[in-house]
Amino acid sequence: MLKLAVLISGGGSNLKALIEAAADPSYPARIVCVGSDTEAPGLEHARAAGVPTFVVRPQDSDSREEWGQLLAAAIQEHGVGTGPEPGLVVSAGLMRILPAGFVREFSPNLINTHPALLPLFPGAHAVRDALAAGATETGVTVHIIDEGVDTGPVLRQAHVEVQPEETEEELHERIKQLERPLLVRTVRDIALDTLDLVQISQQHQS
Ligand code: GRF
């Protein structure tokens, strides 16, 4: 059974999809904790499901690296990133760049979901940037996190056609409708070793 630590900053609809998937005994992963950089509304999904939560605020640290160390320690307290079965850290709407030390600590068992077809439109405003660029198609990418901003190896993608006159919120919601099941399937495939993160990450580096 793959142990998951999920990191969020907002409403947590991707987290909710993972919680619902993991409630099925045949799903090969379990969420052992949910962390955030802020008192995110989505933490309620975890609390309602009886999953332990924690908040580690960057403002309470002297540096980004120190924040990353505190975040890593909070995750490791729940048995992810330690021992022979390291588990998986899932950034599912965490709106912060994880510091290099944190990435090195968990790599390659550290994934992110991003609302664009990477390498197109990395960064915090992917949906807005796709609309501003006049893209006719965008989508979602689940990828391994490396030390760059949305540059790690792509695991899975799903495509969405942009509709004329669509707002950022409307497009983002349509992307999220594909994003939630894509994330659930990707985590399942990692748990079942259909996706081998060590191998994919080594291939990406060579
Ligand atoms: C997702 O689209 C994620 O890719 C992006 O922020 C959104 C989070 O949505 N980084 P939610 O909090 O899971 O509803």
Image: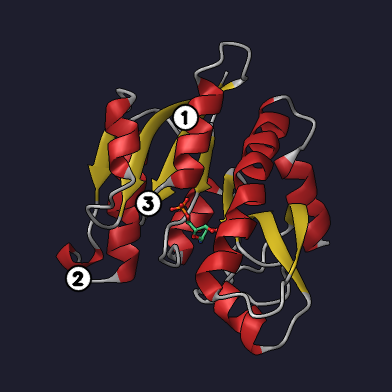
The kind of residue on which mark 1 rests is: Ile
Residue closest to the far left: 60
Q: Element at badge 1?
A: helix
Q: Element at badge 3?
A: loop
- Disc 1 target residue: 19
- Disc 2 target residue: 62
The kind of residue on which mark 2 rests is: Asp
> Is the residue indicated by label 3 positioned so its CB lies within 8 Å of ligand 1?
yes
Give the Cα distance between marks 1 and 2.
Answer: 33 Å
Give the Cα distance between marks 3 and 1.
Answer: 14 Å
- The residue positioned 49% from the left and 50% from the top of the image is 92
Question: Which of the image's four quarters has the N terminus?
Answer: top right
Tell me which label, 1 or 2, sits earlier in the chain.
1
- Disc 3 target residue: 11
Residue 154 is situated, as x and y percent measured from the top left of the image, at: 74, 57
Dots 3 and 1: beta carbons under 8 Å?
Answer: no
- The residue positioned 83% from the left and 62% from the top of the image is 206
The kind of residue on which mark 3 rests is: Gly
Quarter of image, res 184 = top right
Dots 1 and 2: beta carbons under 8 Å?
Answer: no
Residue 127 is situated, as x and y percent measured from the top left of the image, at: 59, 73
Looking at the image, residue 184 lies above or below residue 96: above
Q: Is residue 81 visible?
A: no
Tell me which label, 3 or 2, sits earlier in the chain.
3
Tell me which label, 3 or 1, sits earlier in the chain.
3
Q: Is residue 63 left or right of residue 17?
A: left
Count all numbered tags in the image, as a single digit. 3
Q: Is residue 28 visible?
A: yes
Q: Element at badge 2?
A: loop
Residue 108 is situated, as x and y percent measured from the top left of the image, at: 62, 47
Quarter of image, res 190 = top right
Q: Nearer the viewer, residue 120 or 179?
A: 179
